[in-house]
Every structure is written in structure tokens, then in C-alpha cells.
Amino acid sequence: MYPDLLKIRPFLKVEDTPDGRAVATGIATSDAVDCDGESASFPETRKAYEDWSQAAYNATTSAHQEPSYGNLRIQHGLEIAGKVIKIDYRPDQKQIWISGEAADDHVSGLLRRGILTGASHAGRYGRRWHADCGTDVETGRYCPTCRKEVVVSYWPILSEISWVDKPANPSPPIPTRGFPT
């Protein structure tokens, strides 16, 4: 069985809504090799995000609530941070961008002050494999077929996205088009 999943990316921008809540925008995931030596396979990861966000959208709109495209937590704990208000799939860059709105003044303050600095998706691995040979890699980065450490491709089964204090990738992404406006 695959281990649990945590993948972290830094914010590009934090700005305020007219009512004073913070909105954080950045890459939720991409196919870039991360500090764990893993790479999210874009087609399968996009499908996982679409399924996860559609379930949240259906749940909120069927209850006549404001739409949510997914839940946001703080540090992968139980504390609610906010909700995803926009998802932008960028297949040419193999990136998924999100904007999330803070639930309250406390979370807005953590975002504005740079205490929460990135997004991290969590859940379980749907699959982990060595992209070159296709061999499943249950844990670590050792490919039993190639008999060496490799970059592992994966796709997630999402349970939530969290805002976290220490992104795995320390450099912010370079915007490739004007999201958000």
C-alpha cells in the first residue's frame, strides 16, 4: 500500500477581497520534480483535482451555499482555513493553480504576515511508478526493475489542500499568464 501524500508549493500572491479577507493564489501542483524526488503526472492529477473540486461544488451548491471548489485546512490539521474559489488547469505548463479565500480574520492575518506561505495537497497516492520503465514503486524511490533510485511519478487521491508554513519548493513560481486578474 502506498504511504500518505503531502505535496507543498509556495504562493505567488496574497491579496484582499473587498470585505477584507485574504485570497492566496499559487500553484497547487505541477509535474516539476519536488524535494521528495517525485513528479505529479498531470493528466491523472488533473482528473483527481476535477473529481475532488466537483464533489465540493456539488455539496455546497446543492445546500444553497456559496460555491466551494474544495476545502482548505491549516497545516493538514482539523482547523478550517478557507475554501478554494478558483482552479486554473494549465496543461501546457502541466500546472494546476488555485485561489483560496481565507475563512476569517485569523487566517487572513496568517496569510498576510507570511506565516502561511504555501499550499500542500494531501490524501493518498492513487499510484506511484517509475515513469521510464512503468514499474510500481510502493515506497521510497528505489525501482526494483532498474535497480536504482529514480524520479517517481504519481497521481493523488485528494482529501484536502492545506495552507502551510514551509513549502517544499523554496522559490515562488513565475507567472505565465495573468491569473488572477
Image: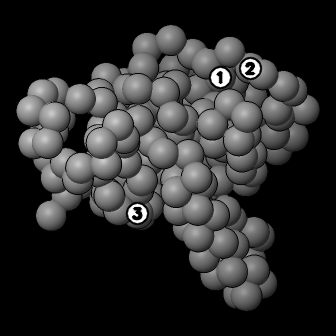
Judge by depth and name the residue closer to the eye, 96 or 71: 96
Query: Residue 175 bears which disc, if any?
Result: 2
**Label 1 sits on residue:** 12
Reading the chain from its start, which is encountered first: label 2 or label 1?
A: 1
Query: Residue 51 bears which disc, if any?
Result: none
Quadrant assignment for the C terminus:
top right
Residue 158 found in image quarter: bottom left
Residue type at mark 3 is Ile
Q: Does residue 5 appear to the left or right of 3 in the view shown? A: right
Q: Residues within 10 Å of mark 2 (few under 14, many from 20)?
A: few
Q: Position of residue 154 (x, y in %)?
A: 37, 48
Q: Position of residue 54 (x, y in %)?
A: 66, 72
Secondary structure beneath dot 1 equals: strand
Quadrant assignment for the N terminus:
bottom left
Q: Residues within 10 Å of mark 3 (few under 14, many from 20)?
A: many
Residue 101 in view in this figure: no
Above/below status of 13 relative to 76 = above
